[in-house]
């Protein structure tokens, strides 16, 4: 396990964490969401951090605190809104609250960006094949936390900066391979005559 690397730029709001698992991953094309509104489309991924990575969880909380402190003057006009671990406006969440088995035993962050993030393999080479990055893959991820105020609501969010694939694992949501789906079906040319 790698120690979290808090970068001094951005007032210690940027951190590299991992290995962690990605979920609901859209890194090669922007995701519009269920409403289909392209104007709000973002590149995004859920980042699942095992609760056992206590040092990483504490580093994330420190970066979130730095973003909160900056936002007091930069976005919130000196006000200090209540944003804590129980708030929907807090970006680090307990996976036990989700009805998804993959999230159990983890905390998670949803990170988004309007610009295409850098996505590389272990050696730092760009990943071209979109099938290499999927929900369930392990990666190191760089995120920057920032404060926001939208329609009068204040909060802290995570901007996705870069992703470096670490290793493969079972895909979340389970998909069926060609051999699993059609492996037991005899295929011969004689069947074509029945069509």
Image: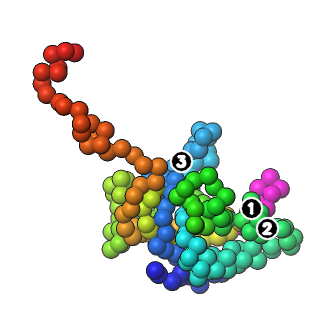
Q: Residue furthest top?
A: 194
How far apart, in angstroms, are the residues tagged by discs 1 and 2?
A: 6 Å
Q: Position of residue 120 (x, y in %)?
A: 38, 67
Q: Residue at x 46, y 54 (%)?
A: 172
Q: Assess whether mark 1 and mark 3 are in contact (beta carbons under 8 angstroms).
A: no
Q: Indicate whether residue 148 is drawn in magenta.
A: yes
How far apart, in angstroms, are the residues tagged by discs 3 and 1?
A: 21 Å
Q: Residue at x 24, y 39 (%)?
A: 183
Q: Earlier in the sequence, mark 1 or mark 2?
A: 2
Which residues are drawn in magenta? Answer: 147-154
Kindly state the secondary structure of the residue where label 2 is placed. loop
Q: Which residue is mark 2?
A: 83
Give the dominant element type of the magenta stretch: helix, strand or loop.
Answer: strand
- Callout 3: few (<14), some (14-19), or many (20+) C-alpha neighbours within 10 Å? many
In the rendered image, is residue 159 in sight? Answer: no
Q: Nearer the viewer, residue 60 or 143?
A: 60
**Position of the C terminus by quadrant:** top left
Q: Which residue is mark 3?
A: 31
Q: Assess whether mark 2 and mark 1 are in contact (beta carbons under 8 angstroms).
A: yes
Residue 134 position by quadrant? bottom left
Kindly state the secondary structure of the residue where label 3 is placed. strand
Q: Which residue is mark 1?
A: 89
How far apart, in angstroms, are the residues tagged by discs 3 and 2?
A: 27 Å
Q: In the rendered view, would you say 188 is above or below 142?
A: above
């Amino acid at each position: 396990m790698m120690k979290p690397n808090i970068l001094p730029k951005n007032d210690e709001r940027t951190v590299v964490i991992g290995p962690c698992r990605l979920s609901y991953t859209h890194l090669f094309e922007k995701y519009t969401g269920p409403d289909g509104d392209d104007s709000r489309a973002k590149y995004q991924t859920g980042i699942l951090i095992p609760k056992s990575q206590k040092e990483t969880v504490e580093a994330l909380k420190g970066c979130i605190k730095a973003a909160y402190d900056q936002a007091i003057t930069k976005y919130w006009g000196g006000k200090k809104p209540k944003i804590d671990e129980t708030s929907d406006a807090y970006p680090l969440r307990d996976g036990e609250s989700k009805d998804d088995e993959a999230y159990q035993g983890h905390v998670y962050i949803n990170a988004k960006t309007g610009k295409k993030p850098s996505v590389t393999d272990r050696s730092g080479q760009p990943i071209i094949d979109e099938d290499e990055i999927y929900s369930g893959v392990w990666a190191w991820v760089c995120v920057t936390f920032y404060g926001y105020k939208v329609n009068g609501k204040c909060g802290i969010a995570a901007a996705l900066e870069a992703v470096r694939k670490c290793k493969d694992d079972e895909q979340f949501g389970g998909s069926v391979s060609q051999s699993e789906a059609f492996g037991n079906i005899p295929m011969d040319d004689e069947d074509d005559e029945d069509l």
